[in-house]
Image: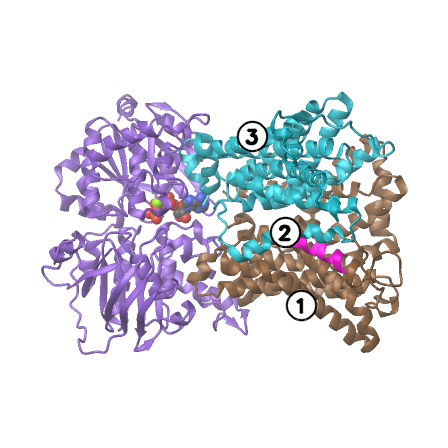
Chain colours: A brown, B cyan, C purple
Amino acid sequence: MSIDTAPTVSATALDATSGAATRRDILHRLLMTLGPILAALVIAGCILLAVGVDPLAYYGYVLEKGLFSPLGIQQTLTRMAPLLFLAAGLIVAFRAGMWNLGGDGQFLLGAVTAAASAPVFVQIMPFWLALTCSFLIAVVVAMIWSLVPALLRAYQGVNEIITTLMMTFLGTSLANVLVKLVFRDPGTTVPQTRTLPVEDRLPRLFDTTITSGLLLGLAAIIIVHLVMTRTAFGLKLRIVGANPRAAVHAGLGVPGLTTAVFAISAGLAGLAGAVDIIGVQGNVRADWNPAYGLAVIPAVFLARMNGFAAIGFVFLLSVLSIGGESAARRLGVPNHFTLVLVSIVLIVLALAEYVDHRYNQSRKA
Amino acid sequence: MTGLFSAVFLSALLFGAVTAAIPLLLAGLGEQMSEKAGVLNIGIEGMLLAGAYLGFVGAFYSGSLWLGFVTGAAGGAAVALIMALLCVRIGLNQIVIGIALTLGLEGLTALLHHFQFSRSYPRLPAADATVIPLLSDIPVIGPAFFKHHLIVYLAVALVFGMGYLYRRTQLGLNLQAAGDKPAALDVAGIDVIKTRTIAVLTTGALAGLGGAYLANVGAGLFIPFITNGAGFLGIVLAMLARGRPVWVLFGALLFGVCLSLTTAMQVAGINIPTDVIQMLPFLAVMIMLVLFGRRASLPAALGIPYERGAR
Amino acid sequence: MSSLSSSSVAARDIVALEGVTKRFPGIVANDSVDLSIRPGEVQVLLGENGAGKSTLIGMLSGLLQPDEGRILVDGKPTPITSPRHALALGIGTVFQHMMLVPTLTVAENLLLGGRWWQRPRTEELAARVAEITSTLGITVKLHAKVSELSLGEQQQVEILRAMVRKSRLLILDESTSMLTPKGIDELGALMRRLVEQGLAIVFITHKLKEAAAFGDRISVLKLGRKVGEIPPERFRALGEQAIISEIVELMFGKQSDDPEAVERPVRTVHAEAAPLLQVADLAVAPTDNAPGLSSISFDIRPGEILGIAGIDGNGQKQLAEALAGQRAATGGSVRLEGVAIEALSVGERRRRGLRYLTDDRLGEGTVGTFPVSINFFLKQVGAAPFWRNGVEQRAEIDKRATQLVREYDVRTPSLKTPVARLSGGNIQKVLLARELAEGAKMVIFNKPTYGLDLANTLASRQRIRDTAARGLAVLLISTDLEELLSMCDRIAVIANGALVGTVENVDDARTKVGRLMIGLAA
Ligand SMILES: Nc1ncnc2c1ncn2[C@@H]1O[C@H](COP(=O)(O)OP(=O)(O)OP(=O)(O)O)[C@@H](O)[C@H]1O
Ligand SMILES: [Mg+2]
């Protein structure tokens, strides 16, 4: 299987080697991002009008609750934490040409293990050690979960799109089974895991409600970016991704690297789940599946697998989802409109990038 | 426990399995065609949803199931048209657009449903079955397989039609070339973009039909997120089938049985979380892959947009 | 001359290019090129790697559109908008890069392009193919999958396809590169017959002898510009040697006699020196689409060049890959400097000084989307001084890459250009630079000059000789007998995955190798 994203990969390969971006470049990028978002808002606004909702009021709430109100922005930043980890995991996988579409399963299993272990650990160990152990367990479980697709791909050449998709279906069900049968909190009637007391969760930043998981997420994605673009290990993964036969020819241990990619990618997805639970949710309810992965995948692509750009897109996603949720509540629109909005934003951004690319090419030629 | 294995129960179970399998079958057949032609159609879940919603709307307002199938197929094809324009014609990333379309249609159909039907949750009358004489009299098997809506038989016939198309017609060759070496097809004088567009639109129509069947015949109503991942299952089926339509049929039936079993268990009040049963088909396939895992023979140019003369 | 006479000349052209220019990012691939293609003539197109020959063909076959200038068909300006249009105009092309669908059979490939609702007409095809193949003197397995054919066989199928389509203008872009000497001669005879029937042919090659033997008119491209032409009258007046020296002058501006016929310098290989590479009873299992190897044994001493001759697809690639460690051997031993290496990985073998220059430049030799600079170091990722503690040292990489680009004369717009954008010859230079870098002890060259222009071929051969002269052991795999005869100390012949004989490269080596190749005793 070779889904070669030729233009994207070549562009990122160049990004990686070209020096610091100039001011104008950044300005241009910003314009090429904000312009399409505006256009998308107009299109989505038409849909709102069609169903009889005032788009200006809706967007007003989105901006206020997602961005400008102190509480809203804090929620937005908190939401970013798990998304950043997921994005980091996807960057590793996609740069190495592995289509890990199983992020949601890995995320949920990480979340469930963290939810099951953290309340126990905090009682028997010091706080930091307990949380670290929970994180570690979540990572390891997610890694083990990814082992099947990884080994099948590495040694049998079985396409990972199928296997990771199936493992994500399996993982979602397994997470539910675990919550309902194994880790169920006997103290409540609703099926859910034991709740981690608020004081035992990841500390908040300063006097806000922002989780410190945000900082961890930022660190993770930046480290991943630097490793992928600046180190020998990252280059090896990128070679495997861009041309696996060349990797064999160059003497790289492709099966080992493949397994490593899956382990890192899944580990980060597992961490995302753990951070969401230990930082924010406190427990896992049965049938809980935020399906973050599905929205993060296109965001990572639009960022061209560049970590810094991905931070921007994750921020955008968070604003839209937090703002959208509360705007929907106030205006009596179903929350599902957020999905429509995100979808239109993604498509228009992709289109804008294409137009920009074309324009640049015709100018150069 | 005797009730569990009675003939009535068994044939109801199998009947449910076929009903659950049809949307998967249509989605899988559709996806297979796109993949053959080199397009990874991740937006198929959105196409199913569009088909389910528009199929329901069509049938609800016209009172005709067949019209519902037509509007459903048209709805799926309309979403596919967006995919074809963006991913085939101008070569945008298929995964980005596919996922965006899925998200968008999840939201859009739920939104429209909210404003149109959320107060009344209208239902369609049960679809009338085409009973096949003689065969339907066979005990257990008869009521399970030969008392379905006509579209079910057509869908099964389509499996063989597709098999013929792929192996025996020029279009079959074109599709395969478009997926394996599009440049070779292009220099042979066949438009790669057109070939792939045809494939994607067919995918959309088939998925739309599957969605309409799911809403109109399977459930009798539309609810948000009704497809519940059927499109992604279709992708899995298409990839496992290695280009052979018959394998999509077998796969769809396997998953259909498990889905039907889940419902039956709930009805029978058996105390195993349905999640356990939902895991079964995936477990079965994963175990098969681990045991017999062979190289998936996917088209070489799958997911790569074609641009003439580029290197 | 007056416009009247020039237009009457143009009227005889099937196809004519007028001031055609084509630009790619950072490069002008064709710079106002004029070309007239006439019925009854073989127009030979010559030029270095990257001169723009394939680009020109791309525009004639509807794959590319010119940025400036126009194309006349039968005297009328006709933009060729698509490959389909080109076929409809009667322009059939055999492209430089394979244009067959590997998963379809030969017959299905030949049938590709019919109306979509039709059933493929296999019987009709079989009859037509039989007709053509009998005149061509080749056999084609119509029902074999293309992926099971050797590159040479695939090339035959491509030529066959162009013939089946009954074109008025037949374009052959380096179509002889994979053929045997006999196959090349037959193709030449066929071209002659076709032009006598009134076809026009455009023939691209890097082998000047073929140009002189098969052509009627020669046009030379250099850096995208047409720098000269030998019209038919002059062509007929000159002998082969005179033509070749005129071409060389046009291409390189210097005079020399047949440049390929350099004397093989007599090197002294110390017969008593311990062999650097010892291969004994090496065996590889056959796979679906590749022959296996059986009991391959040979030694190479330091400073020695051992050639492997044979018809393409007889196990050459398997041999190279088994030695490099890319393909699992089922038996036998490989020793480098006396140490057994048959169980080592590709990377470990490389670290011990074994180098493999692959013949599949884009498929495995390079990562097409990566910049030229990184492609120089694909096999050294992580090594100092280009990486320190695993961190990339961009300045070091660029410095060394600049050096290599200069040293090996790689024509590239910049170090950052994705390597797939370079012409075939320039990609090959990147590979040569990479494999011959420090630390090599034994080098396997697999078809090192395939697709290279004359200057690059000569330069590459010189590098190989220099490599041996530095005391390295060289295994040179080639389908070009002239090349082997001009370079090797000994030549082994491979057939069906086994070495059928080894001859010292002395006076009568040519006949001996030739006899072995066609299955006779030396
Ligand atoms: N699609 C493309 N994009 C960018 N550059 C291109 C493209 N096609 C060709 N080039 C560049 O145009 C130039 C001419 O290439 P072309 O393939 O025509 O050379 P050629 O004469 O056929 O060489 P060779 O003998 O190596 O085949 C080269 O420098 C090549 O890098
Ligand atoms: Mg060329």
Regarding mark 1 in the picture, which secondary structure is present there? Answer: helix
Q: What residue do we see at 86% from left, 56% from top?
A: A190
Do circles 2 and 1 both sit on a common chain? Answer: no
Q: What residue do we see at 74% from left, 72% from top?
A: A132
Q: Give the range drawn in magenta.
A: A164-178
Establish whether ligand 1 lies closer than 8 Å to the Cβ of label 1: no
Residue B259 appears in view: yes
> What is the number of the mark on residue A140?
1
Q: Report crowding for label 1: few under 14, some 14 to 19, many 20 or more residues within 10 A (C-alpha).
A: some
Q: Mark 3 and 1 residues: CB-CB less than 8 Å, in contact?
A: no
Quadrant location of the N terminus of chain C? top left
Given the image, on which type of amino acid does mark 1 rest?
Val
Residue position for label 2: B282
Q: In this view, does C86 lie above or below A25?
A: above
Given the image, on which type of amino acid does mark 3 rest?
Ala
Q: Is residue A284 above or below residue C181?
A: below
Q: How many marks?
A: 3
Residue position for label 3: B157
Q: Report which quarter residue B14 is drawn in.
A: top right
Helix, strand or loop: magenta stretch: helix
Tell which circle, 2 or 3, labels the residue nearer the N-terminal end. 3
> What percent of the width, then of the height, locates residue B187?
40, 35
> What is the number of the mark on residue C34?
none
Seen in the image, is A326 located left or right of residue C23? right
Q: Viewer-nearest of labels 2 and 1?
A: 2
Given residues A107 and C455, the one toward you in this image is A107
Establish whether ligand 1 lies closer than 8 Å to the Cβ of label 2: no
Q: Mark 2 and 3 residues: CB-CB less than 8 Å, in contact?
A: no
Seen in the image, is C255 located left or right of residue B307? left
